[in-house]
Amino acid sequence: MKQLLVLSGKGGTGKTTVSSALIALSKSKAFADCDVDAPNLHLVTAQDIKPQTSDYYGFQKAYIDSEKCIKCGLCEETCRFNAIHDFAVNVSECEGCAVCSEICPVHAIGMKDYSSGKLILYSSNDITFSTAKLKTGSGASGKLVTAVKKQLKDNSENSEFAIIDGSPGIGCPVIASISGVNMVLIVAEPTVSGIHDMKRIIETAKKFGTKCAVCINKYDVNKSKSDETQEYCNSIDIKVLGRIPYDKTVSHAVNNCRSIAEYPKSSAAKAIAEIWAKIKNILFKGEFIMKIATASEGKMVTEHFGHCEGFNIFDTGNGKITGSEFVPNPGHRPGFLPVFLADKGVKVIISGGMGQGAIDIFNEKGIEVIVGASGVAEDAVNNYLLGKLKSTGSVCHEHQHHDECGE
């Protein structure tokens, strides 16, 4: 079973928003929330069945048998965690080191299993959702994450793909989450702290030899920091799979306990759909392979999509152009060209202008649309691969150009 782990170097970047959308878009039947300190994926994945719960015993803690205790005070003097007071153990402070049980002269202190949290499993209609809730003050977060992943695997033997919503930061739960996954998607935000923490999680993932990619959430709130994020990732050969715009629909979706993927016309949902298309290429084809088409007049990007001379279709792999061909325009009729290009495996279409009807059909096919481009087609594609070419979002509304632009 291939596993995609969604992480963020810090909290509040939109990691769970992206995770829940990817679960919906991929139609994954196996997913997990490994943020055991504060799990919340269940709030937006509409779990309407009663979960199975079980205690998780992460380690042992000390206890004192009052009938055997001679009140010598040696245990309290020796405990470096100050967990023993008045000949009783405070389990919130006990770290389970067992020194007290070793030095007790009358063997009045023993060790017993301690519940570190609850394992939670939702299972219905071939869908498996594994999660957990860590008990306050427990230090077994990494172990509990490992148990969550094992529970997912044991109960989804027939699933080929799983999505895991990880913890923020780079601590024990994150390290346990990364172990054994096929790919890590890092959700970054365009701030000073966001870039700093993204770098930390990239370094952490690299130590495991795990394939990494980045997406930038709310990129348009600070475009200069988004560009800085892109440039850093380019410099270390980490792919930025997409930029998600700030979208008030996300707040509406979260407030209603729904995934943003349930609002497919929203700008955030469209951006995440494009990211998912690229993830599929990486996970299931082994590398970032993509066909990019430009509506062209010869070698130049044309202003009008529908009546262009033809399409330069570029094969790309790992951020570079690996081949190209020119395909003549087979003739324009409403709704035909988006289907024609989709059948050729095109994942991105670049044009000067395009009608809204054509854009909508491309979006339905999971094809990213870049409008407002100009110049040499090959240069436009290279700029796209470098993250420098962005759609202006401009749609051709002039009546005389509607048909030419694919409306």
Image: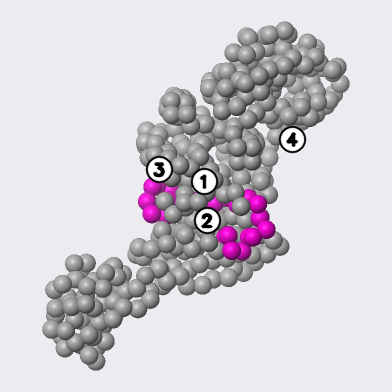
Q: Nearer the viewer, mark 3 or mark 2?
A: 3
> Which label's residue is closer to the chain start, 3 or 1?
1
Q: Position of residue 19 (x, y in %)?
A: 56, 47
What residue range appears in magenta?
A: 152-174
**Secondary structure category for the residue under label 2:** strand
Question: Between disc 2 and disc 4, whose residue precedes?
Answer: 2
* Scheme of image coloration: one colour
The kind of residue tagged 4 is Glu
Residue 128 appears left or right of 308: left
Q: CA distance from mark 4 to mark 1?
A: 25 Å
Give the residue displayed 72% in from the left and 16% down from the top: 325
Residue 248 counted in the magenta span? no
Query: Quadrant location of residue 235?
Result: top left
Kindly state the secondary structure of the residue where label 1 is placed: strand
Q: Is residue 22 left or right of residue 235?
A: right
Q: Which mark is residue 364?
A: 4
- Label 3, label 2: how far apart the Cα atoms are: 23 Å
Measured as percent of width and height from the top left, residue 220 is found at 51, 29
In the displayed structure, does residue 375 sit left or right of residue 196?
right
Q: Residue at x 24, y 92 (%)?
A: 67
Q: Is residue 155 magenta?
A: yes
Nearest to N terminus: mark 2 or mark 1 = 1
Q: Within 10 Å of the Cα at label 2, are there few (<14), some (14-19), or many (20+) other Cα atoms?
A: many
> Of the residues shown, which amino acid type is indicated by label 3?
Lys
Q: Which residue is mark 1?
A: 6
Q: Nearer the viewer, mark 2 or mark 4?
A: 2
The residue under label 2 is 33
